[in-house]
Image (tube, rainbow, N blue to C red):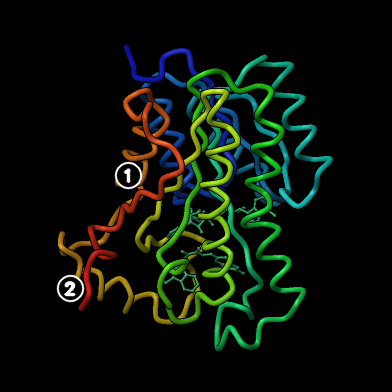
């Protein structure tokens, strides 16, 4: 018997086979969960459908998380198909690329609003819609990064957004706790995904982790999905509102 036999998981944030959300989907599926997926733009539709089919999933729905109507349609479809939901994976972030270089000082009002809407408000919006479907023992998981707590060059408005996301996790944990639903974040170390492409100095950041982190290596998507599986399963039944680092220990170092 798998750890998640009979459980139903809705996954936001698969763009391709390198996506952290995809590694999480495979880990949940391996333990017996059924998965449903959403994709952000038409351009991603076919790729996400193919990935979904490869894990035996036929619920694949469009959802730009800045659109309330699309979010509503996703949850009404999931309600029709499944009636209930056990696990929600939020693996979504976006800032305009001009905001991810230079100084935070140069962030535009619009750039700030977009980063906050896609990367932070979306967790509130998805949790609100998921709440009526989620059972006792439900689990909501989001992804964050150390740039929320410490200054990381170029992360800028995303660092501010991730700080907001981490605070959101704590408040939502309090809101959802009474109905037995837990809300946690995984703070992943740098991984080569679409969200890390084209970031200047990414190679040096990976090298720094290898030199400095206690485990002296970078993390993989599978390192993250192992912890996501723990957070999705009853093994973590007493854990909520936490930010769990999966970063080879990099964050604990002072120098
Ligand atoms: P990724 O590019 O595969 O995933 C990001 C996802 O966000 C994509 O699927 C994209 O379609 C989705 N997205 C963007 N705008 C959206 C919108 N408006 N509506 C719906 N979806 C939208 O990259 P990833 O590295 O797997 O990123 C997943 C999460 O992990 C993000 O929250 C990211 O901040 C976080 N994270 C990544 C790293 C890293 O180094 N890659 C480290 C720590 C945390
Ligand atoms: C992103 C920017 C700057 C430094 C960065 C990152 N470091 C890491 C990331 C050091 C690890 C990746 N990360 C943790 C993210 O959350 C990335 C979010 C992101 C990436 C892009 C790239 C393409 C784009 N918009 C983006 N919005 C958010 O146009």
Label 1 beta carbon less than 8 Å to ligand 1? no
Q: CA distance from mark 1 to mark 2?
A: 21 Å
Q: Is residue 253 above or below residue 67?
A: below
Helix, strand or loop under label 2:
helix
- Mark 1 or mark 2, earlier in chain: 2
Instruction: Write the residue at 66% across / 82% down.
Output: 107
Which quadrant, please, contains the N terminus? top left
Instruction: Write the residue at 67% across / 62% down.
Output: 116
Instruction: Write the residue at 15% across / 59% down.
Output: 215
Instruction: Indicate left or right for 213 with 247 as reference.
Output: left
Helix, strand or loop under label 1:
helix
Q: Where in the figure is residue 154, as x and y percent of width and height?
A: 50, 80
Which quadrant, please, contains the C terminus? bottom left
Q: Is residue 232 above or below residue 154?
A: above
**Closest to the observer, 81 or 238:** 238
Residue receiving disc 1: 222
Residue receiving disc 2: 211
Q: Where in the figure is residue 26, as x and y percent of width and height?
A: 41, 33
Bin the neighbour count of mark 1 within 10 Å (Cα to Cα): few under 14, some 14-19, many 20 and up. Answer: some
Instruction: Indicate left or right for 105 with 64 as reference.
Output: left
Q: Give the farthest residue toward the right.
A: 69
Label 1 or label 2, whichever lies nearer to me, is 2
Instruction: Indicate left or right for 80 with 190 as reference.
Output: right
**Closest to the observer, 212 or 255:** 255
Instruction: Write the residue at 52% across / 49% down.
Output: 16
Q: Where in the figure is residue 14, as x and y percent of width and height?
A: 55, 45
- Label for residue 252? none
**Closest to the observer, 217 or 227:** 227
Q: Quadrant of residue 112?
A: bottom right
């Amino acid at each position: 018997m798998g750890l998640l036999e009979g459980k139903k998981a809705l996954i936001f944030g698969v763009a391709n086979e390198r996506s952290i959300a995809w590694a999480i989907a495979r880990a949940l599926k391996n333990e017996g969960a059924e998965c449903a997926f959403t994709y952000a733009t038409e351009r991603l539709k076919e790729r996400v459908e193919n990935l979904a089919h490869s894990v035996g999933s036929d619920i694949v729905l469009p959802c730009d998380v800045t659109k309330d109507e699309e979010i509503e349609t996703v949850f009404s479809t999931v309600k029709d198909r499944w009636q209930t939901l056990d696990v929600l994976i939020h693996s979504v972030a976006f800032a305009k690329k001009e905001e991810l270089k230079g100084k935070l000082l140069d962030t535009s009002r619009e750039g700030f609003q977009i980063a906050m809407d896609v990367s932070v408000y979306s967790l509130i919006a998805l949790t609100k819609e998921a709440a009526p479907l989620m059972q006792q023992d439900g689990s909501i998981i989001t992804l964050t990064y150390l740039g929320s707590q410490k200054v990381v060059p170029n992360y800028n408005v995303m660092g501010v957004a991730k700080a907001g996301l981490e605070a959101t996790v704590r408040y939502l944990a309090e809101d959802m706790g009474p109905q037995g639903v837990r809300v946690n974040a995984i703070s992943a170390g740098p991984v080569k995904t679409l969200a890390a492409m084209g970031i200047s100095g990414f190679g040096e950041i990976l090298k720094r982790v290898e030199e400095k982190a206690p485990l002296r290596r970078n993390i993989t998507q599978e390192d993250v999905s192992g912890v996501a599986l723990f957070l999705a399963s009853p093994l973590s039944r007493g854990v909520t509102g936490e930010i769990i680092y999966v970063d080879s220990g990099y964050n604990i170092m002072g120098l």
